[in-house]
Amino acid sequence: MASKRRLRRKVCGDKIGFDNPLHACQAIGNMQRKRGFQGDLHYYECPFCKKLHVGHKPGGQHYNRR
């Protein structure tokens, strides 16, 4: 069984936490512009730090379209 500390590192890790959805959406736009298509990114509330993180939907396909 995983410890809570290990789970938090995996979920939060070195991700950026955003305070509001507007900043999270702007970050998604910046990522798409700088790196190209990264798959369908969305923001979600972290259960540990209660901030918004940006990531892919669980179980989705992750690919780069170039």
Image (cartoon, grey):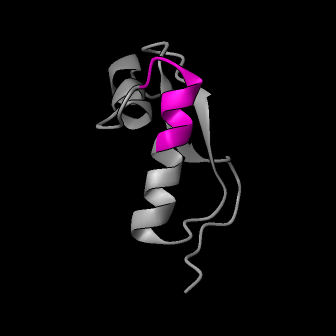
**Residue plotted at (54% across, 66% down):** 38
Q: Quadrant of residue 10?
A: top left
- Image coordinates of residue 66 in percent, x first then y, are 55, 87
Q: Which residues are magenta?
A: 18-26
Q: Indicate whether residue 11 is drawn in magenta.
A: no
* Number of marks: 0
Left or right relative to 60: residue 30: left
- Image coordinates of residue 56 in percent, x first then y, are 60, 50
Left or right relative to 62: residue 24: left
- Image coordinates of residue 52 in percent, x first then y, are 51, 25
**Residue plotted at (70% across, 53% down):** 59
Q: Indicate whether residue 20 is drawn in magenta.
A: yes
Is the residue 51 above or below the residue 33 in the image?
Answer: above
Is the residue 58 above or below the residue 4 in the image?
Answer: below
Q: Main secondary structure of the magenta part?
A: helix
Left or right relative to 32: residue 59: right
- Image coordinates of residue 47 in percent, x first then y, are 54, 17
8 or 65: nearer the eye?
Answer: 65
